[in-house]
Amino acid sequence: MKSKKKESIILMTSIILFLIGYAIVYPENMGICDRNNDACIYSMPTFTIGEPLLFGSISLVVVSIFLFFTNKKSFDIWKKFSIIYLPIAIILILITPVTSGGLININKELTTMWLAGIFFVVSLGIIFGKRDHHSPLDLDEC
């Protein structure tokens, strides 16, 4: 089996980001804050940092698991897509207000969910759509 060092780094990084996001959104579950200490719980940057990290990293964790079973060509195409997409998504999330009003209610949580969903769908399209004939993902060989 080939070494999957890059895929391992991506998986570990996405798990760490998920845990950081989870700790910020649910500090009482991680032992950071006491369940009865509202001042501690509500002092966390839940909506500005926690939710984007939590929601964004979920799709990255799942995609990084699939990357273990893909070939180098698909991984390279996915890497190029990610290098372009993720910085743009991060900028869009950063400039989106936490709450908004008006006819079109676009807030940071909704923006994060949409961008994470788009990242997930496009990533799976790249991983499953850009395979050569001898890919480990070929189900015909089973």
Image (cartoon, grey):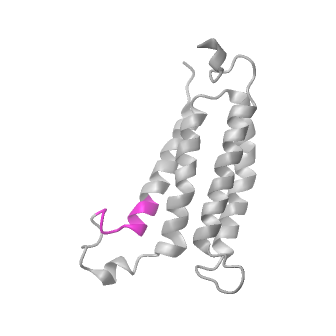
Identify the residue shown where x is 72% and y is 54%. 85
Number of numbered tags placed on the structure image: 0
* Residue 98: quarter of image: bottom right
Q: Is residue 41 above or below residue 142?
A: below
Left or right: where does residue 45 sit relative to residue 5?
A: left
Q: Quadrant of the N terminus?
A: top right
Question: Relative to the observer, which residue lies in front, 88 or 136?
Answer: 136
Question: Relative to the observer, which residue lies in front, 9 or 108?
Answer: 108
Whether the magenta-drawn stretch holds residue 80 is answered as no
Whether the magenta-drawn stretch holds residue 29 is answered as yes
Residue 133, image x, y percentages: 74, 18
Q: Which residues are magenta?
A: 20-30
Identify the residue shown where x is 54% and y is 74%. 48
Q: Is residue 137 above or below residue 24?
A: above
Q: Is residue 108 above or below residue 7?
A: below
Identify the residue shown where x is 52% and y is 46%. 61
Residue 74, image x, y percentages: 71, 32
Left or right: where does residue 13 sit relative to residue 82?
A: left
* Residue 105: quarter of image: bottom right
Furthest residue toward bottom = 102
Q: Quadrant of the C terminus?
A: top right
